[in-house]
Amino acid sequence: MEKGEKKNIIVIKILIILLFFILFFLMYLSVRNIYNNVTFYLNGEKIMNLDLNANYEEPGFVAVLNGKNIKNKVKVKSDVDTSKFGEYTVKYTLEYKYLFIKKELIRTVSVKDLVSPELNVNSDDHIYLYVNENFEMPTFNASDNIDGDITSKVKVHSNIDIKKVGNYNITYSITDSSNNETKKNIEVTVDKKNNLSYIKVSIAEQKLYYYERNKLILETNIVTGMRGVSPTPTGDYKVLSKARNVNLTGDDYTSFVSYWIAFKGNSYGLHDASWRSRFGGNIYIYNGSHGCVNMPRSEVSKLYNMVEIGTPVYVH
């Protein structure tokens, strides 16, 4: 073979090799472009926490190639068992062999005790106490879905000083074996008795309200003094005296009452009015009292037995 022919053969081989590499490179670019056009991701959280025996609902995934849904190319393998504590995995494998595509996603599912203990305190959320009053801490109990009765583990913290007026707190806390915590706070107000128990008379509403420890204890319809003639005096007063079976006298009347609670001198007070069959509404406009607060006998009898001398009376 002549030198020229040999040289041509070498050149042809080099060109074939170069062509092969060019084709391979173009194929690589094409595959890489296809690979990069794959959208594959998880819906929801990659790490999920579930309570024991909870229902695992698969959040799913997105698998798209060049705008086309390829979920059918994804295999999902799961070992999740919510009946047992532990950490499990859900594996999502996307594989397109002839396109050299293989991608994998992992979701972690942790089955834990996520339920906080149940803590019950036998008390209102806000307690009102009188200064120097005997006070027993509210009782309590606690239970847990895993640990059972854990009342003995409840921690109680209190900063109450029953001798001083002020606002305080009692805090109850319990933590189970899985470090789930429950807290309950009770607000405590310590005040002088007359600041927490009082009578409120509303002339506009024709209502009387009695509060103890800032709680409404009694509410009743009333009749106050006749408007424009003998109105009930308004202002801040207090119970001055109490008496049973009293004759109330005026210039032109004498009325027997079974219960008398005076709040301004001896002339104005709260009392029953057996001569009335109705209370409340607008009666005070055309048939009001001589200035006292008329109450149904059944209600004033309750009030009489509850209030003490010095109890504030607010008439407005």
Image: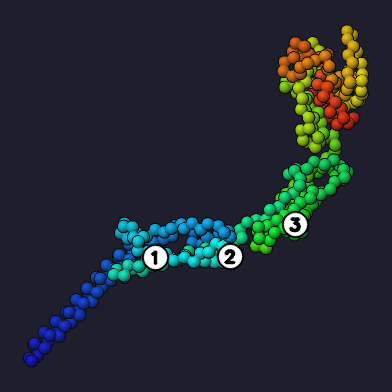
Q: Position of residue 44 (x, y in %)?
A: 47, 57
Q: CA distance from mark 3 to mark 2?
A: 25 Å
Q: Earlier in the sequence, mark 3 or mark 2?
A: 2
Where, by quadrant of the figure, is residue 181 drawn?
bottom right
Q: CA distance from mark 1 to mark 3?
A: 49 Å
Q: Amino acid at mark 1?
A: Lys
Q: Position of residue 8 (x, y in %)?
A: 11, 84
Q: Amino acid at mark 3?
A: Thr
What residue is shown with label 3?
Answer: 151
Q: Is residue 154 visible?
A: no
Answer left or right for 267 relative to 150: right
Position of the N terminus, as image quadrant, is bottom left
Q: Residue at x 51, y 58 (%)?
A: 56
Q: Amino acid at mark 2?
A: Phe
Answer left or right for 37 relative to 316: left
Q: Residue at x 76, y 45 (%)?
A: 123
Label 2 residue SS: loop
Q: Residues within 10 Å of mark 2 (few under 14, many from 20)?
A: some
Q: Is residue 210 visible?
A: yes
Q: CA distance from mark 1 to mark 2?
A: 25 Å
Q: What label sits on residue 75 in the rendered view?
A: 1
